Image (spheres, grey):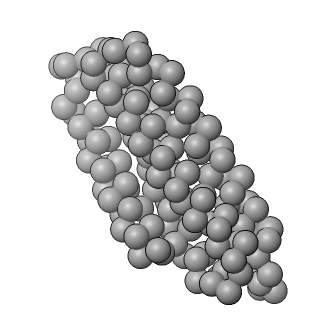
Amino acid sequence: MNRTWLMLGCVGAFLSVLLGAFAAHGLKKLISIDMINIFSTGVDYQFYHSFALFICAIYAKECQQQPKAQRFLALAARFFIMGIMLFSGSLYLYALTAQKWLGPITPLGGVCFLLAWVCLGICFWSSQSKREI
């Protein structure tokens, strides 16, 4: 699973750079500055949480023999992925289409991010490793 998380982290980071460049250069003539800022917020959160997937992948080896830690680590990674799709994805679509119905989706992505960080913290806390993180 950690290989999948590494690859999704790479894809997410790659797309963050690509979409950030698109926002900075390609959208100037298409949408307002306010919408570009909304789009850029999606890019920022996608980038941060792509790195969180790297953390999950790297830490997976640390908790191989610890089922509780593994469960929470897997939950964290899944919530990070869902958060990126819901939070960042809804911001991208809203900025490009101005469809108001997308507004309520964004907080669901934010909740996924919060749950992911809680799950990651529980994973670290429940890990029985004697080494410092």
Residue 133 visible here: no
Q: Is residue 19 above or below residue 75?
A: above
Q: Residue at x 65, y 68 (%)?
A: 71
Q: Quadrant of the C terminus?
A: bottom right
Q: Residue at x 19, y 19 (%)?
A: 30
Report the side of 36 relative to 124 (left or right).
Answer: left
Report the side of 93 relative to 67 (left or right).
Answer: left
Image coordinates for residue 115, horizontal then vertical, percent: 66, 47
Q: Residue at x 26, y 47 (%)?
A: 18
Image coordinates for residue 2, horizontal then vertical, percent: 48, 75
Q: Is residue 48 above or below residue 125?
A: above
Q: Residue at x 52, y 56 (%)?
A: 78
Nearer to the camera, 126 or 15:
126
Total numbered circles: 0
Residue 123 in which image quadrant? bottom right
Residue 123 visible here: yes
Image coordinates for residue 118, horizontal then vertical, percent: 71, 52
Nearer to the camera, 19 or 60:
60
Q: Is residue 48 above or below residue 40?
A: below
Q: Is residue 32 above or below residue 83?
A: above
Residue 94 in which image quadrant? top left
